[in-house]
């Protein structure tokens, strides 16, 4: 049973007296205890989709239609007060840069206990004990003393662990991880991903994992959805997506991955369309090596092929 469903989500940005559509009928389903990856190039709509779930959108963004169902409630229509209760407690965010979420003027301990006191109804020594426990769970050594430290006294990887500790301190059912390893070196990146997988397994936490790294998606995610220019162009299990990609864009992304068998990297020619660009047909058509005449005239719909979904005229 799905714990979170995004149904036909459409979103636009208002700029210079015009509305520009950024998301087109986005449909995603996240199961209990599952890690669903949302993958694609920068600017394709991954983060704005995730922020729609949390209702943390910029002032000029507007959801024009669709539903986001969590526990039989549409998150787009519940009151701001009820949304505040859900955000941070039941649905937590692990951002790309933890320094944007940690206040440099307060100790790690004070920031952790504030969240615990707000969402867990624990006070004083009980809240402090819980804070120490969650730091130990995310494998921060000498947790008792580190509670007294400030964010700048932690490395990038340790700061990311603190943010993850904040999420599990509230027993969040869903964690949105927005490229949580981008700024980290390869060794620390692997440690953070291992930690997320451990949390998923131990607590049956559901993850919406945002990434542009297909290697990480293959290793960590159960299912994956590929985004391009605000569209979901392919959905499948991560293994099926990697070994049997169906959309030309997915194929091109995988071919661009570095490997030990070649010294030449394939690249995708051209640039993704801007949100201000108008396209009548498939948004990937100008860059697609398999394009046909119909691709520039008619936008393809997402259709089911066995256990996968693909939006491409090659499969119609």
Image (cartoon, helix red, strand yellow):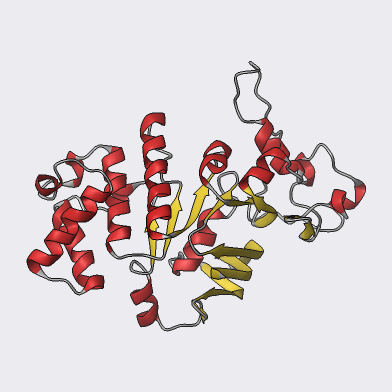
Is 152 displayed left or right of 22 in the figure? Answer: left
> Which of the two residues, 216 or 237, is positioned nearer the viewer here?
237
Q: Is residue 73 above or below residue 149?
A: below
Question: x%, y% of residue 73?
Answer: 50, 81
Question: Where on the picture, by quarter, is residue 255?
Answer: top right
Q: Is residue 107 left or right of residue 164?
A: left
Where's residue 122, x and y in %? Answer: 16, 71
Image label count: 0
Viewer-closest of 99 and 75? 75
Which x, y percent locates residue 253?
A: 66, 37
Residue at the location (42% across, 53% down)? 201
In the image as oriented, which residue stretches furthest toward the top? 263
> To which quarter of the image does residue 123 belong?
bottom left
Residue placed at 22% from the left, 50% from the top?
Answer: 135
> In the shown orientation, is residue 135 left or right of residue 283?
left
Identify which residue, 183 or 124, lies in the foreground. Answer: 124
> How far from the left and from the top, in percent, is residue 42?
55, 45
One can see residue 15 in this view? no
What is the quadrant of the C terminus in the image? bottom right
- In the picture shown, does residue 190 fall above or below 174? above
Quarter that holds the N terminus = bottom right
| Residue displayed at 8% across by 64% down | 125
Name the residue furthest right. Answer: 293
Does the rendering let one see residue 154? yes
> Going 19% across and 55% down the picture, which residue do you hit?
133
């Amino acid at each position: 049973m799905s714990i979170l469903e995004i149904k036909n989500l459409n979103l636009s940005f208002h700029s210079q007296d015009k509305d520009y559509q950024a998301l087109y009928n986005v449909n995603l389903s996240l199961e209990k205890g599952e890690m669903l990856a949302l993958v694609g190039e920068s600017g394709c709509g991954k983060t704005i989709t995730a922020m729609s779930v949390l209702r943390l959108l910029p002032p000029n963004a507007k959801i024009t239609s669709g539903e986001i169902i969590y526990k039989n409630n549409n998150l787009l229509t519940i009151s701001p007060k009820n949304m505040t209760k859900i955000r941070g407690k039941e649905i937590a965010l692990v951002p790309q840069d933890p320094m944007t979420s940690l206040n440099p003027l307060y100790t790690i301990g004070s920031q952790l206990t504030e969240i615990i006191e707000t969402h867990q109804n624990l006070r004083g020594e009980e809240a402090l004990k819980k804070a120490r426990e969650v730091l130990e769970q995310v494998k921060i050594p000498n947790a008792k003393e580190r509670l007294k430290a400030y964010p700048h006294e932690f490395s990038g990887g340790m700061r990311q662990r603190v943010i993850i500790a904040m999420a599990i301190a509230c027993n969040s059912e869903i964690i949105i991880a927005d490229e949580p390893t981008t700024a980290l070196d390869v060794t620390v990146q692997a440690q953070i991903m291992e930690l997320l997988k451990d949390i998923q397994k131990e607590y049956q936490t559901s993850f919406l994992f945002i990434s542009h790294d297909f290697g990480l998606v293959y290793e960590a995610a159960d299912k994956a959805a590929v985004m391009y220019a605000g569209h979901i162009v392919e959905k499948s299990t991560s293994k099926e997506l990697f070994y049997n990609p169906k959309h030309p864009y997915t194929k091109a992304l995988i071919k661009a991955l570095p490997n030990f068998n070649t010294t030449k990297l394939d690249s995708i020619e051209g640039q993704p369309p801007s949100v201000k660009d108008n396209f009548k047909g498939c948004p990937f058509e100008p860059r697609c090596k398999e394009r046909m005449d119909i691709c520039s005239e008619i936008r393809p719909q997402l259709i089911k092929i066995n256990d996968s979904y693909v939006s491409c005229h090659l499969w119609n």
